Amino acid sequence: MNIEIKVDDITLSTVVAEVVDFDEDGDLVSSGKENTVAHLVAEQIVARLVRDDRYPRLRDKVTEIRDEEIRAAIRPSIVEAVNRPIKKTNGYGEATGQVTTLSEVIVDEARKYMKEPADKYRRENGTVLQQLVRSAVKEAFETEIADAVKQARDMVAAELGDTVSTQIAGAVKAGLKAK
């Protein structure tokens, strides 16, 4: 008696189960999706990874790699979009003026923004650019002045420390001689 068992080739794409869902009445309904060996393997890998203490670092690393790959994939499209010629349009979408590029439009808008008054109701406060320059200069001066004051304070403390210790030592000696 020969018993012959034949097993078909099993690959990652071999269907092993049909996915079912529940409808609003609680009855089983076929979703039309199928689970493959790859789905089951992936579920087991994810379950083991999530239990591992190293999972948060791995998740962050995978997210970082994903973000880098997305940036690399869309970078050519962005460069093309910025440098491709476009026609300016009016508020109705009708072509007006000459052909330009998105980068030129961005530069023009940035120039307009920098020339706008910082406060539209009080123009004496200057433009946005003037406000930015003022705040940068103020911050730089505050940092420099704070450093200079700290150096001066350290020098005075060192100078006074030597003088005060000499005076205290002299007073102690004088007090000991008087006894």
Image: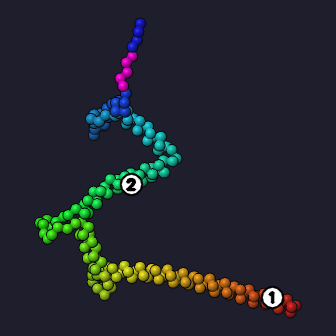
Which segment did they paint magenta?
5-9
Gap between marks 1 and 2 measured at Cα: 71 Å
Query: In which quadrant will I find the C terminus?
Result: bottom right
What residue is shown at x 59% (from left), y 82% (from top)?
151
30 vs 44, nearest the viewer: 44
Q: Is residue 21 rendered to the left or right of residue 174?
A: left
Q: Give the answer, above or below, for where 119 lies relative to 41.
A: below
Q: Is residue 156 above or below residue 39?
A: below
Residue for badge 1? 172
Quadrant containing the N terminus is top left
**Three-letter amino acid code of the residue under disc 2:** Glu
**Residue 36, percent from left and from top:** 35, 33
**Predominant secondary structure in magenta?**
loop
The disc, 1 or 2, on the residue closer to the chain's N-terminal end is 2
Q: Give the number of callouts.
A: 2
Q: Nearer the viewer, residue 114 or 99?
A: 99
Q: Residue 82, image x and y in percent?
A: 26, 63
| 177 relative to 43 in the view: left or right | right
Q: Quadrant of residue 128?
A: bottom left
Q: Which residue is mark 2?
A: 68
Q: Residue at x 37, y 35 (%)?
A: 38
Q: Secondary structure at mark 1?
A: helix
Secondary element under disc 2, as helix, strand or loop, is helix
Identify the image quadrant of residue 86: bottom left
